[in-house]
Image (cartoon, grey):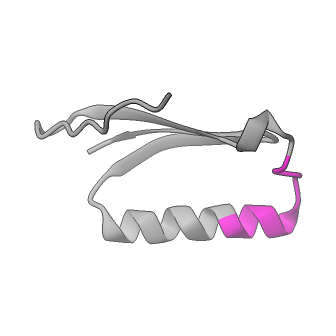
Amino acid sequence: MARKLRYMKEENTTFEITCRTIQGRLLLKPSAQLNKIILGILGKALTLYPVLLHLFVVVSNHIWGGNKS
């Protein structure tokens, strides 16, 4: 069951974000094309939202990132 959405209004709040593939399947096969897609999505998100991305990790069944607003 999913959790309720949370919003932290305070400045300089650190967030951790994890996205898992459907049923934990190994769908994110390492490749140059996947790298371009992920970097494009992160780049677009960073232009839309005023956050500082500390790091992100992509494995075959998860995408994990930590940021600070």
In percent of width and height, residue 34 lies at 78, 63
- Residue 62: image quadrant is top right
Task: Point out the image quarter for the C terminus.
Answer: top left
Q: Is residue 34 left or right of residue 3?
A: right
In percent of width and height, residue 9 lies at 12, 40
Q: Is residue 52 left or right of residue 39?
A: left
Please check the rendered image and state whether residue 10 is part of the magenta-colored stretch, yes or no. Answer: no
| In this view, 4 is above or below 32 | above
- 18 or 21: nearer the viewer: 21
Identified at 46% across, 32% down, the residue is 2
Identified at 23% across, 33% down, the residue is 13
Instruction: Tell me where the magenta segment starts and ends, as one range.
Output: 27-37
- Residue 21: image quadrant is top right
| In this view, 39 is above or below 62 | below
Identified at 31% across, 52% down, the residue is 51
Q: Is residue 60 left or right of residue 45?
A: right
Count the marks: how many?
0
In percent of width and height, residue 8 lies at 18, 36
Identified at 39% across, 30% down, the residue is 3
Residue farthest front in this picture:
1
Residue farthest left in this picture:
10
| In this view, 20 is above or below 50 | above
In percent of width and height, residue 47 lies at 37, 71
- 49 or 18: nearer the viewer: 18
